[in-house]
Image (spheres, helix red, strand yellow):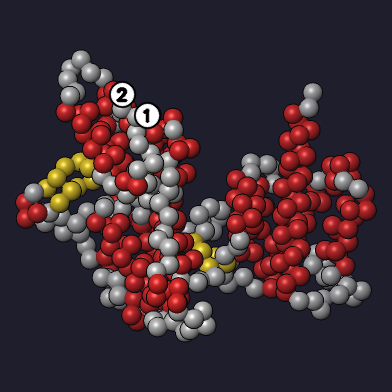
Amino acid sequence: MSLPLDDPDFELVWPLDIFRDELDVVLANRSARAAKHLLREAFASPRMAELVEQGEQFEDEFLVATDVLGPARELRKRISEVREQKPPKPYYNQRSLPSSAPPRVPRVQLAGDAFARLVKEMDKAGYFDKGLGPDCVDFHRAPPSLLLEERLGVPDLWPLWPGEWSEELFYSLIEVFHDLVARPRVVERYHDFSDCGEHYGQYAVKPGRALYVARVNSILERNGFSVRLAPYGEDAGRVVVATDDARGDLLERSIAGSDADSDDVRHAIGLFRSREATRVEKKSAVVTLAGVLEIERNLLEEKLLSKDEGALFTIANKFAIRHQRADQQPDYDDAYLDWIFWWYLATVELVRSLRQRGAAQP
């Protein structure tokens, strides 16, 4: 039977790249239990997981496990056809509200409510069992408020109640739960005593954090925050200044690099995009990138016009970024640092592309 991927029940509620990576793990492990749990979690309806259950009903000693994984294998082959679920279009009262109208609820409380619901939902699904311990009627876990107080120095934070949160505390909670999250890949058993519920196993930190970051960033974006939770880099799991999609793609490529200078590039990015970054730290980030480019001067001279190559360093030297001399000009707006950082980072990426192209030529 071909999967009806145009059916709304078959819309994906997870980001597609996270689902694809987890699906690859399931198929590599040939686990019907993990496939059923993944499909139940990732799709808008349980119908996809029910297809695996139907296969399990007919499994016998002559049927290998990969036959049960038929729906999962078909999904992987047709991954480009899988549709991600979109948020609903604005409703009438949202469309008719003047854009200049002040928010009816403080922004931190509005986003905090959504965040508290997210944590509750993921906790019920076992995503914090590894970090907080499973919550079972037979052995209750230690109160999460104790761990939160230990890490943040603030008592009585559990259960989460955003009505009294400051912006700083909200961001701190986002970061703490990032460090605690891990995705359970299977349901180990159902504990029916006192309706305790499902107990999980095979916890995986990477997909758990990826899903958590995507959902938290959706909350921050939806509520107009100018920060995001960093998904990668040396500041992964920490709240950083948001960037547009194009610069976000540049950051991702730069951080993923495996060149000899990649650690320096990642360090520069971590310095620059920190929410608390000072002018001094931003200048240090630019100096680090200038140092990376200095090493590549020969390649720049060969592949770029010499006047362009010289301009890269003239700017950094002229405006008291790399050195401190009397003839330099230190009186410039901070926006200049933003411009020079992104220019240098894009040039580093260009140099990497030129190097790779040269290596590929015979």
In this picture, residue 189 sits left or right of residue 160: left
Q: Which residue is mark 2?
A: 66
Could you tell me residue 8's position as x and y percent? 35, 47
User: Does the residue at mark 2 contact the one at mark 1 (Cβ under 8 Å)?
Assistant: yes
Instruction: Give the left or right position of residue 110, taking residue 200 as reference.
Output: right
The alpha-carbon separation of the residues under discs 2 and 1 comes to 9 Å
The part of the image, by quadrant, that contains residue 118 is: bottom left
Depth check, mark 2 against mark 1: the one in front is 1
Q: How far across and down, in percent of the image, does residue 47 sit? A: 26, 41
- Mark 1 lies on residue: 73
Q: Dot 1, how many residues are within 10 Å of its Cα: few (below 14), some (14-19), or many (20+)?
A: some
Q: Label 1 is placed on what type of residue?
A: Arg
| Residue at figure coordinates x 25%, y 34% from the top left | 51
Seen from the viewer's position, the closer of residues 286 and 76 is: 76
- Residue in the image at 65% along x and 73% along y: 278
At mark 2, the secondary structure is helix
Quadrant housing residue 23: top left
Q: Position of residue 139 (x, y in %)?
A: 14, 55
- Mark 2, Cα crowd under 10 Å, few <14 / some 14-19 / many 20+, is some
Rendered position, 225 above or below 202:
below
Quadrant holding the C terminus:
top right
Q: Is residue 43 visible?
A: no
> 356 above or below 350?
above
Q: Position of residue 159 (x, y in %)?
A: 26, 70
